[in-house]
Amino acid sequence: MAKRTDKRKKKTKKKHRFFWFLIKLQIVLMVVVLAGFGYYYFGGYATEVQALKEKAVQTVADSDDSIFIPSQTCSVYDKDGKLISERKGTKDAQYVKYEDIPQDFITAIISIEDKKFYRHHGVDFKAVMRAVKARVTHGRITQGGSTITMQLAKLMYLNPDDTWQYKVEQMFLAIELEGRYSKEKILEFYLNNVYFANGYYGIDAACRGYFNCDLKDLDVSQVAFLCAIPNSPTYYDPVTNIDHTLKRRDLILQNMKDDGKITQEQYYEATKEDIELNRPKKKNTDKINNYVDTYAYYCATRALMEQEGFTFQYYFDSDEEKKAYNEQYDELYAACQKKLYSGGYKIYTTIDMDKQKKLQSTVDDTLAGFTEKNDDGTYNMQGAAVTIDNNTGYVVAIVGGRDQDFNSYTLNRAFQSHRQPGSSIKPLIVYTPAFERGYDPNTIVDDHKFEGGPSNATNTYAGKIPLRYAVAKSLNTVAWQVYEQVTPKVGLQYLKNMNFSSIVKDDYTLATSLGGFTKGVSPLEMASAYAALENDGMFRQPNCIKSIVDADENVVYSSQMAEVSIYEKDATRTMTDVLTTVMDSGTGAALKLSNMPCAGKTGTTNDHKDGWFVGYTRYYTTSVWVGCDYPKSISNLSGSTYPGQIWKAYMSAIHENLDPMDFLPYAKLSDEFIQKEQEEESQKEQEREDQKDSEAEKDSEADQKDSEKDETKKEPADTNTSDKNNNSEDTNVSDDSQNNDQNNNQDNNQDNDNSDSNNSGDDQDNTGGDDTSGDTGGDSGENTGE
């Protein structure tokens, strides 16, 4: 029994070897035949045929499975999982694996496109011979004869042509594909890439586009209807030529019946079925049409880079190091972006669409009066804004410019443009660092004009004042002096620790205390830095991605918001308390929210080219920039005008139904400190009382001695003299009181003058020089800030 089994196995192996011998012999004979025809009919082109064969072998060898996976739709979702937008690739399709393709689809497409699919090895030789004969007879290819495998080769590797070289190369490619992939894989590749007209590539896109349902829900009539289209997508276009499509559908159903794949009854019912189409809409596959998309794709691309192990770097020891890094970054960014755009990914973001729409409309409405446009049709006057949720650190709204229907939003100014920040930079590099180094809100500073220093916006100076007042009025001379003590090296290190991307060597000057940067900062960077002030000095890298899911529903990225300590907790709470004074009585007094404690800072650059307002509550931080892409002076532009108006209107709206929440107290307002101050004050009061008692005792002794002397003299005139001196004292006291009142009035008038002069407009730094728009052009030089 065992011997018989062995003999059967040997016979099977011999048959198998003989079978593949015949296949190879057939291929060789085909090449010889084609070479012979080529030599006889085309004047010795056999060498070219051989070259085409070698090219086909190399082409298939150099490709991998990814070439057959169509560019799939990438989707962006908001914080609630609702679809925001879709980005179509070159082929609007979702990839379907072979096991998920309905059997009716397999049967239908084979019955009409390639009946011998399971019997040939890439090429139907009889059909090819007919094509060669037609080429000889008519001088061009007039018959197809293409198998499904040859059609796949055409789809993936070739540009349409009607020459004999094209057909020969297609044939060789098909043979190579059959040698590399199974029949099932070839069908899978084909059905996911073939064109079904009206922008639909692949069976899934066609199914959803024409019938608005899943593949599994199609009946046999609908399957046959779709399989009628690929042979000639224009002629069988169901939108424009549905009669042609239905006629071919019926042919497919007839073939399926003849092949025993469906019954007579199924055939009859299917041919009588009315086809109701979901009319396809015109698709936009190229443009990203809102600022959420540009930022979401940017964050998602960097997330995939992070998954690849890439380490982001912001500062470099040499130009060579920076160049090498940029080359590596650009290469990987492009690869990850391509992967993201075409891989069918789902990007789940933290964007709150209600806040997003409100922020966009507020920017648009506030700047609606500026109608001048650039040569490219975009508005000349622009604005950008970012909102961060202080509880999570995630971006919930981002606006990169004014809304324009035609605009594809290739520039998102909220994170791609860098501009001079004016005085809005002061809390970050001057005052919070100063609070870490012993300054406090009551530290007395000297606001005065000095050689080599800046002037204040109003060209007035208050003299000796508390630091709190200097910040509230944004006095430039004070910021300059304090920054000199902090030093630019120390101050700018805080920005570098928060990954500000455009700090350069030339920025290490005192001018940066007023916003005088070489390139500038972005609204996103400013929002994330101010959010750190509210978060007790803990910085979180801004991001809007919660997770990314691939086409197979695998979570490939899940965001974990890490915190980095930048400032000391007490310093940030002190800074916040001082910034509330800005809103109460300083340059932001008109911008204070009615029912919500808030802190913020204005910023205006030299000649009113840029205006900033950055502020926060316990709930949200929002930064706003207003200016032109190509910087120029704008009348009435300052931090407290258009940027401040946008900030107040928007922040008022998003806080409307939120409970008021106070900022956390800084140490000097803690219960322990208050108790200590009360004890010290009580001790001082006791010392003052003891001193009074001591003085009173001394006065009593002196009066007693005077009384003894008076008793010895007994002259009548003494009483009158005493009355006269008393009257003189009363007068003197009155004079002293009057003088003190006059002095106090003068002091108050001086304070009021200073207050009025500083409130007459936002504080503008007057150090000279213009601003720079990092990505959109602009003058370089020092900035002037509010």
Image (cartoon, rainbow, N blue to C red):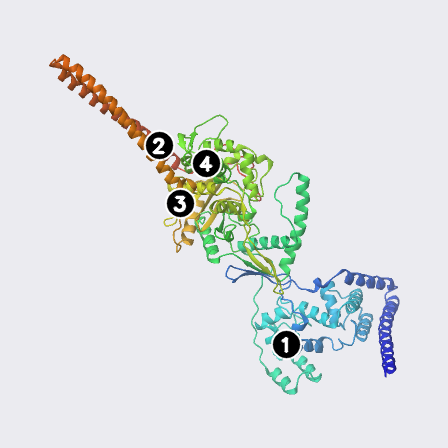
As measured in the structure, the alpha-carbon distance from the residue carrying label 3 to the one carrying label 2 is 22 Å
Which residue bears the numbered disc 2?
751
Mark 1, secondary structure of its residue = helix
Mark 2, secondary structure of its residue = helix
Q: Which of pointers 1 and 3 indicates the residue nearer the eye?
A: 3
Query: Please, what is the three-letter code of the amino acid marked with disc 2?
Result: Asp
Question: Where is residue 521, by image quadrant?
Answer: top right
Mark 3, secondary structure of its residue = helix
Q: Is residue 41 left or right of residue 107?
A: right
Q: Which of pointers 3 and 4 indicates the residue nearer the eye?
A: 3
Sequence order check, earlier mark of 2 and 4: 2
Sequence order check, earlier mark of 3 and 2: 3
Q: Is residue 215 left or right of residue 188?
A: left
Give the x, y percent position of residue 755. 37, 35
Q: Is residue 660 above or below residue 66?
A: above
Sequence order check, earlier mark of 2 and 1: 1
As measured in the structure, the alpha-carbon distance from the residue carrying label 3 to the one carrying label 4 is 18 Å
Which residue bears the numbered disc 3?
591
Q: Nearer the viewer, residue 371 or 16?
A: 16
What number of labels is visible? 4
The quarter of the image holding the C terminus is: top left
Sequence order check, earlier mark of 4 and 1: 1
Q: Is residue 708 above or below residue 500?
A: above
Q: Residues within 10 Å of mark 2 (few under 14, many from 20)?
A: some
Q: Does the rendering let one see residue 53?
A: yes
Q: Residues within 10 Å of mark 4 (few under 14, many from 20)?
A: many
Which residue bears the numbered disc 4?
764
